[in-house]
């Protein structure tokens, strides 16, 4: 006699953690890009711990759930934040030259290209997630253009657009938390599912 065993995944949803780490760090960095305050240790600390490490944890948890898209997104963007902080800190520690504007533009453009392709994957998800990835791709390309041209107005525009991007991730994260708290199938905060 054969017995079938069904394993149920009883672990929590790691996506809100990753989205919050990404969203809050993105808002804070882009408040700087918009010209509201200087780049300081607060942004660097957020980049290391919440934008970086928290997203790596969320990505690892998504891997355990078998979610390739979320694993790739959270781990990649977590490593983006850690590499960005390294690009800023390595020269100040005397361990390497400051990245040139052209090299920084190439770095940001590669992240924009990656994000644009990841956006295609979101077409199977809800509209809120699509907004996060669409605005992020635009943000990377604007930042790359700002570095490439040296036109500060483009970087400031990118800052305001990045604030929108970050808040869209925060909204998506908190909607998932609130909706899951109220039970499966409940939509207290809309995410606009794809039909």
Image (spheres, rainbow, N blue to C red):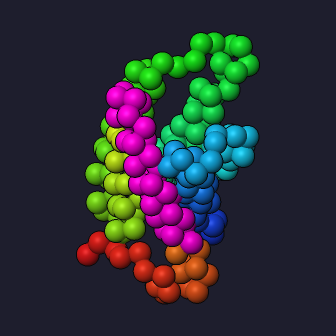
Q: Is residue 113 in sight in this rendering?
A: yes
Name the image quarter holding residue 112.
top left
Q: What residue is at 64 percent from the left and 65 percent from the top?
A: 11
Q: Nearer the viewer, residue 76 or 82?
A: 82
Q: What residue is at 52 percent from the left and 75 percent from the top?
A: 175
Rendered location of residue 166, percent (x, y): 50, 57
Q: Where 158 sits versus 4, above or below?
A: above
Q: Where 97 sits versus 192, above or below?
A: above
Q: Quadrant of the N terminus?
A: bottom right
Q: Nearer the viewer, residue 189 or 180?
A: 189
Q: What residue is at 63 percent from the left and 33 percent from the top?
A: 85
Q: Nearer the viewer, residue 175 or 108?
A: 108
The residue stretch that appears in magenta:
145-174
Q: Residue furthest left?
A: 195
Say whether residue 90 is left or right of residue 172: right
Q: What residue is at 48 percent from the left and 82 percent from the top?
A: 189
Q: Is residue 65 in sight in this rendering?
A: no
Name the image quarter holding residue 80.
top right
The majority secondary structure of the magenta stretch comes to: helix
Q: How many marks?
A: 0
Q: Where 97 sits versus 22, above or below?
A: above
Rendered location of residue 49, percent (x, y): 71, 45
Q: Quadrant of the C terminus?
A: bottom left
Queried whether the magenta region covers residue 163, the answer comes back as: yes
Queried whether the magenta region covers residue 22, the answer comes back as: no
Rendered location of residue 42, percent (x, y): 72, 46
Say whether residue 152 is left or right of residue 87: left
């Amino acid at each position: 006699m054969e017995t079938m065993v069904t394993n149920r995944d009883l672990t929590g949803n790691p996506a809100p953690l990753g989205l919050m780490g990404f969203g809050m760090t993105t808002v804070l960095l882009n408040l700087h890009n918009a010209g509201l305050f200087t780049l300081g240790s607060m942004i660097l600390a957020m980049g290391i711990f919440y934008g970086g490490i928290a997203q790596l944890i969320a990505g690892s948890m998504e891997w355990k759930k078998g979610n390739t898209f979320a694993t790739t997104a959270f781990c990649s963007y977590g490593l983006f934040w850690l590499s960005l902080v390294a690009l800023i800190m390595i020269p100040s520690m005397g361990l390497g030259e400051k990245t040139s504007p052209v090299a920084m533009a190439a770095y940001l453009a590669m992240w924009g290209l990656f994000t644009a392709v990841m956006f295609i994957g979101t077409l199977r998800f809800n509209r809120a997630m699509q907004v996060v990835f669409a605005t992020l791709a635009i943000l990377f390309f604007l930042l790359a253009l700002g570095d490439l041209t040296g036109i500060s107005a483009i970087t400031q525009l990118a800052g305001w657009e990045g604030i929108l991007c970050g808040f869209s991730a925060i909204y998506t994260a908190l909607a998932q938390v609130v909706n899951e708290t109220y039970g499966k199938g409940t939509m207290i905060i809309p995410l606009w599912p794809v039909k």
